[in-house]
Image (cartoon, rainbow, N blue to C red):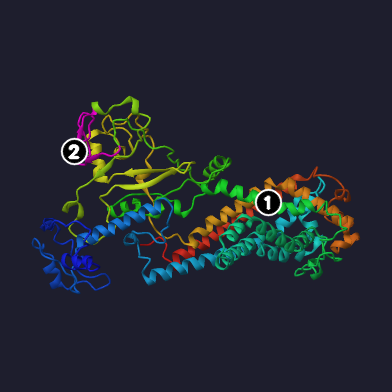
Amino acid sequence: MGRKAYLARLALGRSALEPPEDSETFTAARAGEWTSALHAPGESAPSETEANASSQPPPHGVQLYDRRGHPFNPWARRFSRRLRDAQNDILSVIGVTERKTPVNQEFFTGSLESPHVGRQVEEEDDVGWKVGLTADIDYQLISWWIHALTNRLLVFFPTENISFVEVVRLHRLAMGMHSFMFAGLPSFMLGHLMSPEILTSLALDYLDREIWARVSSRRRREAYVRYRFIFAVGIEVFLNLFVLPLRVHSILQILGFAPDSFWLLPPPRSWLPFCGDSLIQWNADIRHMIPFFMFRPISSLVHQYLFKSFRPSILGPTEAPRFRRSSSQRLAASITSAPIIELPHEETTLTPFFNRLFCFLGWGRPLRSHRSTAPHFQPLLRRRETWSINQPIHSGHDTAVGAEQIPPEASIEPTAQASIEPVMPHLERVHTSATLGDGSPFDRDHDRSSDATIRVSSIGPDGAVNLEIGLPEDTRYELAAAHGGHANDAAFGNGGVGDSFSEPASTGRRNDMDLYEAPHHISKLALEPTELLVNLTNVWVAGWLLMPVRVFVLRGLVRHVIKRPTLFGVDPTRAWALPTLLGSDASVLTSGFVTSGMKHVALASLVDVSLGLGYWLLEWSVVRFIGVSDFGWGTF
């Protein structure tokens, strides 16, 4: 019993569960298409003699064998591969699986499977990571002095009769050149590298792996998942308390209270709770420190919200549209191509405002409007229709539904309008020798240039996926020539396809299917200028929005330092004399919010933006030079 299927496959060259194939399909028009299928996968191509012999169509009822002598059916093998591809396409579209590499690799400039191309891609990514890390460090070194000057101006605001240049000179003389340029930078960089958010995520990932690997009880696993947030909050609070001395010491050095030494870090006793130099004490008045504790979480939430607001509007390398020019490029619109599946951007309330701003500056383009609903069809369009691509579609003709011919008058049912779902028409195309081409290999699994292309247009709030179906160019132009209108009207229901559509859609803008995004690898080096511009814009906008909160936090910290100078290791005499040295008044230590001198803060912010844009232009020039000289950007 167990050898029946094996013997059937050995005798017939196919599965016992597959229907027999018609040998008459091996016609002279398809003589050269099954040449590549006559040798087993992984073997070398057949010789010229074997290719010439195999190019002839096989006689009726003759069993085919590969080079190893195994019987096989190339057509059944081809259909099996296409069935697997269709299943993988569906799983990829609905999000069950994610493709690691695009399927249409043969249309790349160079295949990613090539060792040379793979090494070049890895090298370009490595260079991009190095350039990004170097850019972050260099920008902090270049712009740290203006950030520190802005913080001092928010606390020690100067008088009205002092110019901005004079304020900069007074700060440099009062603090010294080293402290003016780099005060608080070592502590800040160390605290930035020990980010509580990143370390908490790493700790939770390690804890998750250990729990799922060592705990086999389902009840204990569910309890861990239920109370996982407690571990997350506890770990993050502990890490914030650990990084707190570094942040406080950095702020004190920036304001000029701490000793002006370049490499000085907080004393080790600052990390011991309930000690003389520690901020964590039972008898300490921490009311003025509470805003300082809460400023970082609030700032993190604002940065995340702003990033979601303007990141979709800034133009990146992956968003450059191109027109279709050949059948090879039309394959990029296939459902198997990952870049064509565009999910909606996560927009916020401020996204339209930032989108208009960046479009005005030339940093972006208008967001692409996604379709929220599928085209509306009249009830006479059935669940599934088969249209011949060579026969024009008119409302006066009978519509083929399965094996029956139903006239259009009999299909109009007003009582059933609410229960009929509008679906896109299913188009079947008969493959001929003209569609396959003379040089098309038989075994090309992903040659879908003559098939309809499918893409995800939008995903609704309820999780419904809206698909768009585009016809091949020859089919669309045949329908457009027969009925008038744009070539894409036949695919999207924009009128011009008989009377089957109730409301023609507007054809004022170019349809998204006229554009494609070539499936290629966007390296970290190419994305680095965009990422730097996004980070700079995020820092600037968040700094301006949080400036009142920052004034409140810094002034509360200063009042706490003046009240308990020994807790922070600050000299009281220097603390009271510091405002006068910086061109301000001693009353600022006890006054409320800033009442004057905001023009100096505005000028400092303008200098910060100018430094950032100049550094971004420098990095863009360096990245472009590296890409053109080392990786051949702009060449084929």
Mark 1 — residue? 299
Instruction: Tell me which corner region of the image, top left, top right, bottom left or bottom right, holds residue 522.
Output: bottom left
Q: Find out whether residue 404 is within the magenta segment.
A: yes
Report the side of 94 relative to 601 (left or right).
left
Residue sitting at the far right: 573
Task: Find residue 404 and report its image quarter.
Answer: top left
Question: The residue under label 2 is which amino acid type?
Answer: Gln
- Magenta stretch: give its range: 383-408
Front-lying residue, 70 or 433: 70
> Whole-Å distance between the Cαs marked 2 and 1?
63 Å
Quarter in which the N terminus is drawn: bottom left
Dot 1 amino acid type: Ser
Query: For the residue carrying disc 1, how many other residues have a C-alpha within 10 Å: few (<14), some (14-19), or many (20+)?
Result: some
Residue at 43 percent across and 54 percent down: it is 96
Q: Which of 533 and 378 is in front in this view?
A: 378
The residue to which callout 2 is attached is 391
Q: Is residue 578 visible?
A: no
Q: Give the prevailing secondary structure in the magenta stretch.
A: loop
Decide which of 433, 68 is in the foreground and name it.
68
